[in-house]
Image (tube, helix red, strand yellow):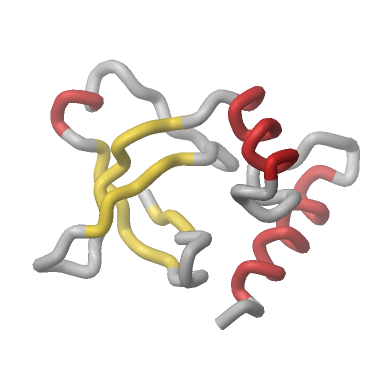
Amino acid sequence: FEVLCLGDGATRLAHVRGKLWWRVWVSTYDLVLVALRSFQGKVDIVHTFTDEEGRLLERSGEVPVGAAGPTNADGDAAHERGLQAVRDVQ
């Protein structure tokens, strides 16, 4: 998978960890928690958030608005604006 890290705005390759391989399905716009590998530029997906958890994180200010995926008819455009705000932080 290719993921956008909200902490620094970098795009990295992600891998689902072994114990989650058969239990987790990751799709476009999913909000995931990743762990950075110290020896490579890759990350491991350690948790996937539900839609409700993503909205809760947005409301509490933990993630930028729009980062948890599209929630309206404007969908993709609103989501891209939210992600662009993260990329502009660099």
Q: Quadrant of residue 46?
A: top left
Residue 11 drawn at (x, y percent): 43, 67
Q: Quadrant of residue 69?
A: top right
Residue drawn at point x = 63 percent, y = 68 percent: 86
Residue drawn at point x = 44 percent, y = 71 percent: 10
- Choose between 47 and 28: the one closer to the eye: 47
Most distant residue in the right direction: 73
Residue 57 drawn at (x, y percent): 63, 38
In the rendered view, does 85 fall on the left or right side of 48?
right
**14 is higher (above) or lower (below) than 85:** above
Residue drawn at point x = 20 percent, y = 36 percent: 17
In the rendered view, does 66 fall on the left or right side of 40?
right
Most distant residue in the left direction: 39
Most distant residue in the front direction: 60
- Choose between 15 and 7: the one closer to the eye: 7
**27 is higher (above) or lower (below) than 75:** above
Residue 89 drawn at (x, y percent): 62, 78
**Total number of numbered discs in the rendering:** 0
Most distant residue in the top direction: 23
In the rendered view, does 80 fall on the left or right side of 38?
right
Residue 36 drawn at (x, y percent): 25, 58
In the rendered view, does 61 fall on the left or right side of 32?
right
Residue drawn at point x = 14 percent, y = 31 percent: 18
Screen quadrant of the C terminus: bottom right
